[in-house]
Image (cartoon, helix red, strand yellow):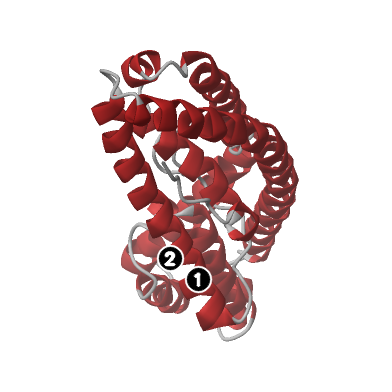
Amino acid sequence: MKIITPILEKYRKGDVAQYFYNVLEIITEDRATTLQIANQRSALATTMDSFKTNWQQVKGSELTPQIAELDAQRDSSYIGLKLTVETWASNHFDDSLKNAAFLIADKLATYGTKIQALRYQEETATLNAIINDLETDLAPQVTQLGLTDWVAQLKNLNTSFNEKYVLRAQDLSTEQDGLVAEIRIQATNEFKLLKDLFVARGTIAIEDAQDNAALFTTVANEWNTLTEQYNASVLRNTVSTGTPTDTTEEPTTEAPSESE
C-alpha cells in the first residue's frame, strides 16, 4: 500500500493547516477506529483543534476597541460635516455661504452616500481623497464657512484610525506566522506517524484479507487524490512564479473566516 507524500515544505503556510484538516475529514473518528489508528488520528485532531482555537482568538482581537472607537468617531465627524453643508446649501440665508456650501456638498455627493458603510480600508482611502479635495480645490469654501477645524478633526481621526489599523495588522501577521509555524512542526510530526502507521496496518490488512482491508483501500484512494490535488497546486504556483508562494493564508474548512 502506498500513500503519496505531500510536498509540505513547498505548501503555502495556510495550506499546510488546511491539508491536515482535509486529511482528518477523510480519516473520520469512526474510520480511524476501524483502521486501528485512532490514537494517531486523535493526536493530530487535538493539535488542529488547538490551532483553530488560537486562530479564533487572534482573529477575534483584530477589531480592537480603539479601532472601533476611532471608526465611530470618524463616521460621526464625516456625517456631521456632510449634513451641515447639505443643510446650508439648501437653507442658508446668506447666498455666498449657501453657494460655498453647495460646492462642497456637490463634491461630497460624487463619493457616494454610504461612505461610512464601506470596508475599513476602502473608507480610509475615500476619506483621504475627500480631505484632499477639502484642503485644496475647496479650501476657500472651507475657510469661508468656518469648517477648517472640522476638516482637520476628520483628517486626524482618519489618520489615527489608519495608523492603528496598520499596526494591528502587523501584530496579527506576526501572531499568525507564529501559530502557523508552531502547527507546521507539531502537526507534521503527528501526521507522519499517522501516515506511517496507516500504511503499515493497511499493508498487513490487505495481505491477510482482513475485514477492514476494503476500507483501507477506500481511504487510501481518497487520501491520495487529496494529496495529488495539493501537490499539483504547488507545482502550478512554482511554474508560474519561479518559486512557491509562501504567504499566510487562512484555512477555509474548519478554521474561522477572516472578516473586518
Label 1 Cα neighbours within 10 Å, binned few <14 / some 14-19 / many ≥20: some
Residue 141 seen in the figure: no
As shown in the figure, which amino acid type bears the numbered disc 1? Leu
Task: Give the Cα separation between the discs numbered 1 and 2.
Answer: 5 Å
User: In the image as oriented, which residue stretches furthest toward the front?
Assistant: 208
For this rendering, which residue is in front, 205 or 66? 205
Q: Is residue 211 above or below residue 52?
A: above
Residue 101 occupies which quadrant of the picture?
Answer: bottom left
Which residue is under mark 1?
Answer: 235
Q: Marks 1 and 2: CB-CB under 8 Å?
A: yes
Q: Is residue 220 left or right of residue 57?
A: left
Question: What residue do we see at 34% from left, 33% from top?
Answer: 26
Going by the numbered disc 2, the residue's amino acid type is: Ala
Q: Position of residue 92 (x, y in %)?
A: 39, 64
The answer, for residue 200, to whether it is visible in the render is yes
154, 251: nearer the viewer: 251
Secondary element type, mark 2: helix
- Place residue 230 in its image quadrant: bottom left
**Residue at coordinates 38% horizontally, 20% vertically from top-left?**
35
Image coordinates for residue 51, horizontal then vertical, percent: 59, 29
**Residue at the spot x=41%, y=41% of the render?**
1
Question: In the drawing, does residue 156 fall left or right of residue 74?
Answer: right
Q: Residue 219: horizontal and vertical position, in percent? A: 32, 35
Q: Residues within 10 Å of mark 2 (few under 14, many from 20)?
A: few
Q: Is residue 3 above or below residue 102?
A: above
Q: Count the marks.
A: 2
Residue at (69% x, 62% y) in the render: 152
Q: Is residue 168 left or right of residue 76?
A: right
Indicate which disc residue 66 carries.
none
Residue at label 2? 232
| Residue most extreme to the bottom | 137
Question: Residue 168 location, x and y as percent?
Answer: 70, 45
